[in-house]
Image (tube, helix red, strand yellow):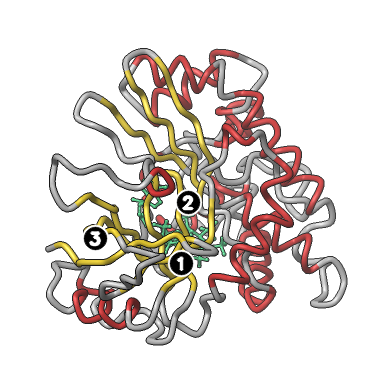
Amino acid sequence: MSIPAYYSFGESPRLHAGHPSTASQPGQKLWLKYLNEGGANIVFRILPISEDDELPPHLQGRLLRLRKDLPHVQSAEDQLAAYHAHFKPLFPRENLTEQIEIELGDGLASSVSDALTQLDRPSHRLQDFLPAEERTGMLVTDMTPGPDEILLQVKPKWLAQSPNAPPDARRCRTCALRAQRASKKIRTATDAQESCPFDLISNDEADRRRAAGRLTDHPLLQKFLINDAQPLLQKLRDNQQKLDFQGVLVISSDTGALDLCKAMTLRDCTLFLKLSGEAIDARLADLDLKLPEKLGRWKKVEQELIDHGWYKNTEDSEHWAKEEICLLSRARS
Ligand SMILES: O=P(O)(O)O[C@@H]1[C@@H](OP(=O)(O)O)[C@H](OP(=O)(O)O)[C@H](O)[C@H](OP(=O)(O)O)[C@H]1OP(=O)(O)O
Ligand SMILES: Nc1ncnc2c1ncn2[C@@H]1O[C@H](COP(=O)(O)OP(=O)(O)OP(=O)(O)O)[C@@H](O)[C@H]1O
């Protein structure tokens, strides 16, 4: 199902629910088509009204990302400000999915929310809608693959060890959490990758090859991860380390919480790799600043990993399984 909208570019780009036509500012009709959603945002394709039409240049190659009306989700203005202040300066422009503000006219958010009730959405997200009075949306670089393209979506996760992990750990933070979750029969999409972040960024090419092989079967994408992606992954790791060198257990809510939140964002962002012919476009996404309200949860997770032996692979015998994935276990065997 496509949702009608109108685009105008007066003082700033704007999407409207109805025709905004004035003599000086005609609107161009287009369609918004639901693409996907996560816990915090809903993403739409922007399409011309017919195949013979073109989108305005400002909308070409972009998706519309609208935040949900949920208490833990920041306003679009705050998300955009944090992205520009904290994350955009850290990485080359060509390695980021752009985030650009777009104004939403009267009624646009409500008309999108109405349309959402008619769509086939994940069952656990059916109660999520947009704030009725929402005035700001985001245009983001469209990484969806065309007919002859392939998209790989990976979360690099914690590329350096947690500063609070024991020195003789046999698991990195990502592998320790995967093992703990497996003991509770929980397996997230990241867990299903069964890949160790330390392999992905290892100095030893054989380790990087192992990680890449777990993330994709495609030889060109594997080769890219093993070689060309390394400077970007190293930058990601270095910033994760720089922004959290003490560890979550040492941080109190007023000392260093902002840097920790930035580090946690970089530990949970997504890397899109889009293969077109032999070229690969590599961009980080989901750089939405995490909020210090999660500090308590992060501390609890860390303490449990330490106290119950998940880092050292000395978890209780009922759940014990020899660690087979983490680079740290191979290095110590
Ligand atoms: O705790 P982690 O490392 O498992 O990360 C969570 C992610 O799990 P993952 O390991 O990628 O399967 C988790 O991903 P999924 O929802 O499992 O896909 C979320 O990204 C979560 O962040 P938020 O609560 O949505 O802000 C993430 O929580 P944060 O720790 O980043 O707050
Ligand atoms: N720039 C993009 N190009 C292509 N697809 C995208 C893009 N951004 C988001 N998507 C798709 O939309 C989905 C949801 O988007 P997004 O990750 O932004 O939601 P979210 O609510 O912020 O996620 P989370 O649950 O991690 O907070 C993504 O998993 C991806 O499939």
Type of the residue with mark 2? Arg
* Image location of residue 238, percent across then percent down: 75, 38
**Callout 2: 10 Å neighbours few (<14), some, many (20+)?**
many
Give left or right: position of 89 versus 202. Answer: right
User: What's the residue at 55%, 56% (across, down)?
Assistant: 315
Question: Which residue is disc 3 drawn over?
Answer: 29
Q: Which of 239 and 69 is in front in this view?
A: 69
Contact between labelled residues 3 and 1, with CB atoms less than 8 Å apart: no
Kindly state the secondary structure of the residue where label 2 is placed: helix
Q: Which of marks 2 and 3 is nearer the N terminus?
A: 3
Give left or right: position of 190 versus 35. Answer: right
Q: Is mark 3 within 8 Å of ligand 2?
A: no
User: What's the residue at 41%, 39% (across, down)?
Assistant: 194
User: What's the residue at 19%, 29% (across, down)?
Assistant: 147
Give left or right: position of 189 versus 195. Answer: left
Kindly state the secondary structure of the residue where label 3 is placed: strand
Q: Is mark 2 within 8 Å of ligand 1?
A: yes
Q: Is residue 130 above or below residue 280?
A: below
Name the mark nearer the viewer: 1 or 3.
3
Residue lying at the far front of the rendered structure: 23
User: What's the residue at 79%, 52% (across, down)?
Assistant: 243
Q: Nearer the viewer, residue 169 or 199?
A: 199
Contact between labelled residues 1 and 2, with CB atoms less than 8 Å apart: no
Give the alpha-carbon distance from disc 1 to disc 3, as whole Å. 18 Å
Residue 178's disc number: 2
Type of the residue with mark 3? Lys
Question: Which residue is disc 1 drawn over?
Answer: 137
